[in-house]
Every structure is written in structure tokens, then in C-alpha cells.
Image (spheres, grey):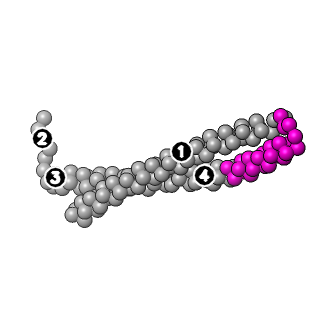
């Protein structure tokens, strides 16, 4: 009985630790999602700039046209880098979401074991409370 009580106390402590791990995994996932959202927003603004400069036709001379094309090329490179950053951030956010799911499964498993142990202790206590051969209360 004491072993079961000690096991229950250990499981309760472990469940608290798993809840803390789940909470920190949720916080990391939220940060990853926020980072992804900011990169996607930046990517959209960069794409809008790229589209706007690609449509320009106000070059007065060849030098202006060359400068526009150079700037357009840099915007295209920046857009490609941004897309790669977005893909990496999306992978990181997905990994954080998977970590949250794993942390929740671990916490739930410990909670289930603790509940089963508590029920076993309660059944054992109830069984030992009734004396053998004792009659129930009169009606």
C-alpha cells in the first residue's frame, strides 16, 4: 500500500512536470507561429513592391532603365530569400506543433496512470475497511 502511495505521489509530480513541459512547448509553438506570420507579411509586402516596380515604365533614359532593372533584380533575390525563410519558419512551426502534441500525449498518459493508481489505492482501502465476516447495517 505504501509503495502504491509513493508511486501515486511520483506520478502526480511527473504529471506536473509534463504539464509544465506542455506549457513551454505551447509558448514555443506560439513564438514560431508569430515568426512565420511576420515573415509571410514581409513576403507579401516584398512581392507587392516587386510587382509595382516590374510594372513601371517611367524610365527617361537608358541609365534609369538600367537602375530600375538592377533594383528589380535585387527585389527578386530578396523575394527568393524571403520565400526560403518562410519555408524554414513553416517547418519550424510544424515541428513545434508536433512537439506540443507529443507533450500533451505524455501528460495525458501520466494522468491516466495516476488516475488508475489512485483508483487501485481507493479500492484497496475500501476492501480493507470492511472486516471479514462482518454484517452490513440493519435495515
Question: Callout 2: 10 Å neighbours few (<14), some, many (20+)?
Answer: few
Between 125 and 26, the one nearer to me in the picture: 26
Q: Is residue 41 above or below residue 125?
A: above
**Percent from the top left, x then y, of residue 127?**
21, 53
Say which label, 3 or 2, has the lower sequence index: 3
Between 74 and 33, the one nearer to me in the picture: 74
Say which label, 1 or 4, has the lower sequence index: 1
Residue position marked by numbered label 2 in the rendering: 137
Residue stretch in magenta: 58-82
Name the disc covering residue 34, or none.
1
Question: Callout 4: 10 Å neighbours few (<14), some, many (20+)?
Answer: many
Residue position marked by numbered label 3 in the rendering: 129
Alpha-carbon distance for marks 1 and 2? 64 Å
Between 96 and 76, the one nearer to me in the picture: 76
Residue position marked by numbered label 4 in the rendering: 89
- Which picture quadrant has residue 54? top right
* Helix, strand or loop status at disc 4: helix
Left or right of 50 on screen, residue 63: right
Contact between marks 1 and 3 (CB within 8 A): the answer is: no
**Residue at the right extreme, as displayed:** 62
Amino acid at each position: 500500500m505504501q509503495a502504491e502511495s509513493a508511486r501515486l505521489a511520483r506520478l502526480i509530480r511527473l504529471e506536473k512536470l509534463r504539464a509544465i513541459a506542455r506549457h513551454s512547448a505551447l509558448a514555443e509553438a506560439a513564438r514560431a507561429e508569430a515568426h512565420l506570420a511576420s515573415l509571410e507579411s514581409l513576403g507579401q509586402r516584398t512581392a507587392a513592391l516587386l510587382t509595382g516596380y516590374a510594372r513601371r515604365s517611367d524610365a527617361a533614359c537608358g541609365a534609369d532603365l538600367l537602375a530600375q532593372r538592377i533594383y528589380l533584380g535585387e527585389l527578386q533575390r530578396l523575394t527568393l530569400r524571403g520565400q526560403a525563410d518562410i519555408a524554414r519558419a513553416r517547418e519550424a512551426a510544424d515541428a513545434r506543433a508536433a512537439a506540443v502534441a507529443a507533450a500533451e500525449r505524455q501528460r495525458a498518459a501520466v494522468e491516466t496512470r495516476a488516475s488508475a493508481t489512485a483508483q487501485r489505492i481507493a479500492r484497496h482501502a475500501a476492501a480493507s475497511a470492511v472486516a471479514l465476516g462482518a454484517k452490513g447495517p440493519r435495515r
